[in-house]
Amino acid sequence: MRLPRYLALLRGVNVGGHNLVAMRDLRRLFSSLGLADVTTYLQSGNVLFSTSGSAPAEEALEQAILQELGVRTRVLLRRGAELAQICTANPFAGSVDVDPAQLYLAFLRAEPGAGGLAAFSVPGTGGERFTVRGREIYLYYPGGYGGTKLTNGYIERRLGVIATTRNWRVVQ
């Protein structure tokens, strides 16, 4: 029997020399929590794992990472099947006027409230576009992510939810 797969996304690790986490230490930690088939992707803070029971709570993983590795981070979880649906639902993928290298996905811990969504807009005039679907925001940055004002921090402040953003290549 194949165990359910999960993806843990750590927010803000190994970015700009801050919150440095060795992937071998992260794999060891997740394995010590009784999780199986633990793998990481590059230095991205993405951890794939399987479990015969339910996945640990996001907050429990955050606490374990803080206690064992000394890094304060946020963790967002998605089931493998859910991630596959997220990938097929990208409204920008395959569009002829979209450069796939400029596609991103913001994962949200919770669905944003109606009030936050009503007031959510693209700051600046860089031509950025977005689509919110449940706990994900599909993002297109025609000028690249480096110069946008539609950042992960902006998303969190405006919507009042924890978020972490990945480029589309990493998501796939």
Image (spheres, rainbow, N blue to C red):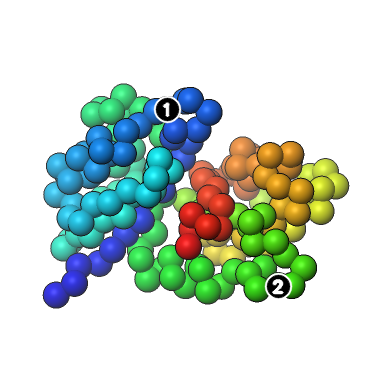
Neighbour class for label 1 at 10 Å: few (<14), some, many (≥20)?
A: some
Q: Position of residue 39 (x, y in %)?
A: 28, 51
Estimate the spatial distance between the alpha carbons at disc 1 and disc 2, rounded to whole Å: 36 Å
Q: For this view, does 87 lie left or right of residue 101?
A: left
Q: Position of residue 154 (x, y in %)?
A: 66, 40
Helix, strand or loop at mark 1: loop
Helix, strand or loop at mark 2: loop
Q: Residue at x 36, y 56 (%)?
A: 7
Amino acid type, label 2: Ser
Q: Residue at x 74, y 39 (%)?
A: 147
Q: Position of residue 22 (x, y in %)?
A: 32, 33
Q: Which residue is mark 2?
A: 95
Q: For this view, does 118 lie left or right of residue 9?
A: right
Residue 14 vertical position relative to residue 50 in the rendered view, above or below: above
Closer to us: 97 or 83: 97
Q: Which residue is mark 1?
A: 19
Q: Mark 1 or 2, which is nearer the eye? A: 2
Amino acid type, label 1: Asn
Q: For this view, does 95 lie left or right of residue 45?
A: right
Closer to us: 23 or 125: 23
- Asked whether disc 1 touches disc 2, contact meaning CB atoms under 8 Å apart, the reply is no
Residue 116 vertical position relative to residue 12 in the rendered view, above or below: below
Q: Quadrant of residue 68?
A: top left
Q: Quadrant of the N terminus?
A: bottom left
Q: Position of residue 126 (x, y in %)?
A: 82, 48
Q: For this view, does 153 lie left or right of residue 86?
A: right
Q: Residue at x 53, y 28 (%)?
A: 16
**In the drawing, what numbered circle is on residue 71?**
none
